[in-house]
Amino acid sequence: MVELLDSINYWHWLALGLLLLAAELLGAAGYLLWLGLSALLVGILLAVVPLSWQLQWTSFGSFSLITTWLWWRRQLTHDKQSDDQRDLNQKQKQLVGQVIKLDEDFPAGKGRVKVGDTTWTAKSETLLTAGTLVEVIAVDGIILTIEAKK
């Protein structure tokens, strides 16, 4: 087994990298991308610098962990930014600017207001009477801030 590991050269690493990248094209959802690139990196490094088989596998593992972690960090940042800007499937963001007619009197402070087929907790600075048109001006978590429509 040691003789087999000792006989691995840079062509083997390049072939493994290309094989992993080809397998990624079949729909591995990104799992094999970073392993393939890491194998290519080891192949390039081995073409330039002679490495023992132990160092080759250690380099492959290290490169795989580093590239995967870097991609994860980038993707996490990107996902957080896009979630803040996205309105799809975020009902509370879609409510801002909506005008609602109150079914019953709304006390100053917190109360419940019906929006469509759902009731929401809402807050208002002033007492609002039934039949008043109110506008949702902000959403804080699941609490709507409403004020009388002018």
Image (tube, grey):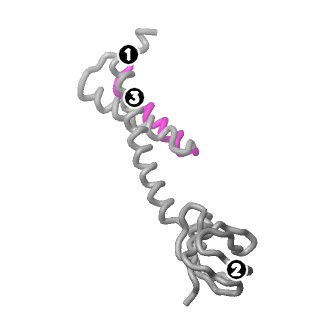
Work out whether residue 127 or residue 86 is closer to the camera in this orientation and state it: 127
Residue 22 is a magenta residue:
yes
Q: Which residue is drawn at 60% across and 62% down?
A: 142
Q: Which residue is drawn at 43% across and 13% down?
A: 4
- Dot 1 crowding, Cα within 10 Å, few <14, some 14–19, many 20+: few
Q: What element carries label 2?
A: loop
Alpha carbons under labels 1 and 3: distance apart: 12 Å
Residue 51 is a magenta residue:
no
- Identify the disc placed on residue 13: 3
Q: Is mark 3 on a helix, strand or loop?
A: helix
Which numbered disc flags the more N-terminal residue, 2 or 1?
1
Q: What stretch is highlighted in magenta?
A: 8-27
In which quadrant will I find the C terminus? Answer: bottom right
Alpha carbons under labels 2 and 3: distance apart: 73 Å
Figure check: 61 above or below 143: above
Alpha carbons under labels 2 and 1: distance apart: 83 Å
Left or right: where does residue 101 sit relative to residue 15? right
Q: Mark 2 points at which residue?
A: 105
Q: Name the residue under label 1.
A: 7
Left or right: where does residue 118 sit relative to residue 126? right
Q: Which amino acid does label 2 sit on?
A: Asp
Which numbered disc flags the more N-terminal residue, 2 or 3?
3
Residue extending furthest left? 49
Q: Which amino acid does label 3 sit on?
A: Trp
Q: Is mark 1 on a helix, strand or loop?
A: loop
